[in-house]
Amino acid sequence: MNEYDSNRIYDVVKEIGFKKTEILSEATCYLLNTCHIRDKAKEKVYHEIGRLKKNFRLKQKPIVIVAGCVAQAENEEMLKREPYIDFVIGPQAYHKLNNKIQEYLKKQKRLDETEFDAISKFSFLKNIKNSSKKVSSFLTIQEGCDKFCHFCVVPYTRGPEFSRSFNEIVKEAKILVDNGVREIILLGQNVNAYENKNFRLSDLIFEIEKIPKISRIRYTTSHPKDMTDDLINLYKVSKKLMPLVHLPVQSGSDKILKLMNRKHLISDYLKVYERLKEINSEIEFSSDFIVGYPGESENDFNDTLNLVEKIKFINSFSFIFSPRPGTVASKLETIDREISLKRLEKIQQKLFNHQINKNKSLEKRVIDVLVENKTKESSKFFGRSEHMTPVIFDGNNDEVGKIVKVQIIKSNQNTLFGKVIRKSKLRVA
Ligand code: SF4
């Protein structure tokens, strides 16, 4: 979402004459868009600002803005601790950026713009463009979260759940497609909680699918509780919804899910898994895992390993629990770090093996790849499989933005390598 937000921020500041520069020392304004999900997010911000200070030691300092979720969470504290920062702006206030920059230039007074507004920023932002000519583009449809998992800062940094207007999203999808996008990834912190005037995520996908030139649709990130029948059943009829479901589970133990306040049981998760597999056995799952959550016993961890073994997730994120200030879990007693490290190693080994096996099973097979771009190093091209796996192959420029058939020759954990099979070489059944 930060990648999407950064592009939107750039669209905003362009209107008052700013241009991107690759040369840091040339910058007259430095905006750091931050994420609070990762470990030590706050410290990384101060480290970056330290680097900036060094760069501008002998020069006129740029306007320094910290945006995003760390700015939202730390606001006053950040302005107090680091005088080099001129203002902080939360993720719900990007539409005010230009006014704030101009206000700062006029008054030279440091600013804190982190209130949650009743009116959404989306009502003010202009329609998205595809200025970087990407084949695959994010499109935010929903923000915020009302679920309050005990380890997570999102409800505090992104605010309550908000779903954008159905018509606005469809309009934006059409603009993206007119500008060369062929794959849209619908984004939200709780994307499958999307609801606008009775329209749900399934309605949105169904509508976007009607845009003729769109080839693929994905959505992320989902909550198991919101995998409703309409969304599951869409997999029966949709031709463009990709068969990879990123569905964070966090733990395989009901006890830990309860401690995390995840609001679902493992049996609910398995029901979703089984129903989707029944609809299409090619559907694969990826997930997020937190190991070493306060209270996690060896048995609880084994439950997680068993789940990983059963579902054979093909691509997942796994982390050791790290407390986020202000969350319920930050007040709980953490478990021994050595134990957590061992558990992380174990789960990652399993997850990586499944990924390697999945990729290996594709060798010699011909798969559909959406061609995204030429690689930097050589004449090879880059694209992704239906399951999002990167594919490197010999292609040609005319194929960018198209789906080609690629025969997989070899693979490693993260990537497939192959050659394009052109029509004349395909056997006709
Ligand atoms: S559902 Fe996701 S975004 Fe919401 S609190 Fe839980 S982990 Fe955070």
Image (spheres, rainbow, N blue to C red):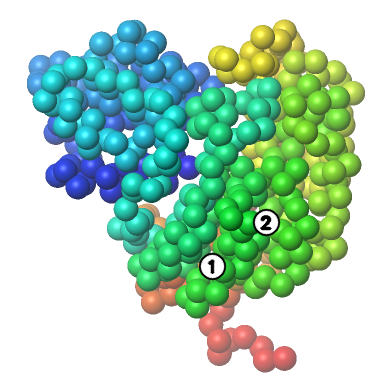
Residue type marked 2: Leu
Q: What residue sits right under mark 2 in the picture?
A: 244
Query: Residue 79, position in %: x, y?
Result: 32, 13
Q: In the image shown, does 345 or 315 lie closer to the viewer?
A: 315
Dot 2 or dot 1, earlier in sequence: 1
Considering the numbered disc 1 on the image, is that residue within a helix, a strand or a loop? helix
Q: Is residue 247 left or right of residue 76?
A: right
On-image quarter of the C terminus: bottom right
Query: Residue 96, position in %: x, y?
Result: 29, 36
Res 372 quadrant in image: bottom left
Residue 368 drawn above or below residue 69: below
Query: Residue 166, position in %: x, y?
Result: 52, 59
Instruction: Please report the residue visible at 67 percent of the width from the left and 91 percent of the height from the top.
Output: 428
Considering the numbered disc 2 on the image, is that residue within a helix, a strand or a loop? strand
Residue count near mark 2 (Cα–Cα under 10 Å), binned few <14, some 14–19, many ≥20: some
| Disc 1 CB within 8 Å of nearest ligand 1 atom | no
Instruction: Please report the residue visible at 62 percent of the width from the left and 26 percent of the height from the top.
Output: 152
Indicate which disc residue 351 carries: none
